[in-house]
Image: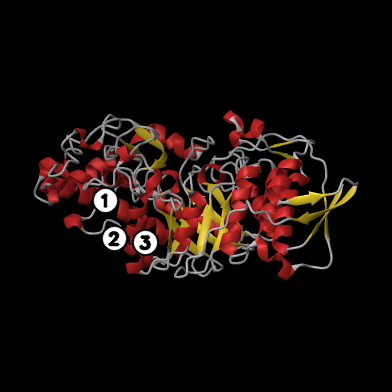
Amino acid sequence: MEVSVIGNPQAKKIFRSELACRELGFRFGSEVISGESRNKVSFSTHHQSSKWKQIFGLRCSPRSSVKCEAIVSDHVPFLKPTPTSRSLESVKLFVGLPLDTVSDCNNVNHMKAITAGLKALKLLGVEGVELPVFWGVVEKETAGKYDWSGYLAVAEIVKKVGLKLHASLSFHGSKDPEIGLPDWVTKIGEAEPGMYFTDRYGKQYKDCLSFGVDDVPVLDGKTPMEVYKGFCESFKSAFSDYMGNTITGITLGMGPDGELRYPSHQHETRLSGAGEFQCYDKHMLSALKQYAESSGNPLWGLGGPHDAPAYDQQPHSTSFFSDGGSWESQYGDFFLTWYSSLLTSHADRVLSVASSAFSGTGVSLCGKLPLLHQWNKLRSQPCELTAGFYSSNGHDRYEAIAEIFAKNSCRMIIPGMDLSDEHQSPASLSSPESLLANIKTSCKKQGVVVSGQNSSASVPGGFERIVENLKDESVGIDLFTYQRMGALFFSPEHFHAFTVFVRNMNQVELSSYDQAVEDEAQTVSIGSGTGAPSLQIA
């Protein structure tokens, strides 16, 4: 069957995006998106076209070769422009690829599905895609032996489609999908458990290395920083043909899930507390002991705070985070200053390694911060403290971090730009809007360019909130990455909302399509799909 789309170029672009998905027989619908299948993309020879006709405003005649007109729908929402806000036409939009785009065996998962998705994004007008590149996949078996084949294959597809690529070098593991640290690193960790973050119960976080071993030769006689440098240099060599043209940006992983923070919750994300301090591996305890002795208070170096709440306790259940509690005492300032200094030093080391390795390549370097908005209406803002963000005397907790980013000429990625205060539980005492504004202010003071991301889960009013943040004149965000491609992303309901979001960024309204009507029709062929395994996303 052939379909011709007549009318406004933007409407054609939207319709052709849908056809690119259907070209390989993407199957969308409630049976795919509900339950466990919501994280999967599958293929089918059955096309559910009626929903797409409804969404995109198509009128078709029942012939083997039909013409479809783009119909202006009164039900398509558009955000009202704000007279004082900045234009969004200069904001580059990227979309994150699935975390398991390349498997732990270095194979490209679901090549046809990925290719079809890339074509859809290109036709819609997206600038590029973000690709997670895992240390545990590339340098899996032996130190210094790199296999980039799977990621090179993806880069070539992205190049052929005509998109840009942002690579996220991930020196951490993942639970979903299951991608760990390199096998040779894990083997060392069995004999040297002190290289992992550890809480006061002795529980270890094994998805990234402790900040306490940054400059300790625990990896076959090399420090983690030396190993990361070799990884970066190998990446630059392997992708030299793509650097500065297809590859326009690189993000350096700096902690759990790639973010600059301590794993204060370890893997327990549903607990009600503010997290716990992760300072009980032998290397961090040794550093704490030395710091305490140098300050003249050796007894303070025996461990972390004894009166901090547990993972499942609310922050105010003990005295440490309470108003006038230990966090505000001389001891609290001592411990939190030391704890946060290791985080800041780690950021400086990683970004310095990247700046040196990628100097002169023409790519922008980035690092990602978390948006720790839970409990931040409390004076102590405990989630920030357990994750490593602190400053004495009530000073800005993020300014020191912004200084490090400025020093290394790196952009700062801030997630959660889809979050609003009104949709937070009152009991969580959360204010993502105020925290985001605070971090933006710190970056502006230090001249750090901010890039945005959304949170990992879909939230009410998320697209509208993203646009509001991107229009903020106080900090000119020129790049936003939407996370993440997968079955839910390409479902009719979500993809429709995403196309409206793109239109708002491009300031294109379908009601003005008569000004851009082309005389000729464009013809796109739709082929039947073939069976393929499912595609997993984050």
Q: CA distance from mark 3 to mark 2?
A: 13 Å
Residue type at numbered disc 3: Lys
- Left or right: 318 with respect to 370? left
Residue 26 coordinates in the image, percent (x, y): 72, 40
As helix, strand or loop, the secondary structure at mark 2 comes to helix
Q: Nearer the viewer, mark 3 or mark 1?
A: 3
User: Is 142 rendered above or below residue 243?
Assistant: above
Residue type at numbered disc 2: Ala
As helix, strand or loop, the secondary structure at mark 3 comes to helix
- Image point (47%, 66%), residue name: 82
Mark sitting on residue 400: 2
Crowding at dot 1, Cα within 10 Å, few <14 / some 14-19 / many 20+, comes out as: many
Q: In this figure, which residue is indicated by the disc labeled 3?
A: 440
Marks 3 and 2, the one that precedes in the sequence: 2
- Image point (63%, 40%), residue name: 487
Residue 168 coordinates in the image, percent (x, y): 52, 52
Q: Are marks 2 and 1 in contact (CB under 8 Å)?
A: yes
Residue 516 coordinates in the image, percent (x, y): 73, 69
> In this figure, which colouring scheme has been used for the structure?
secondary structure
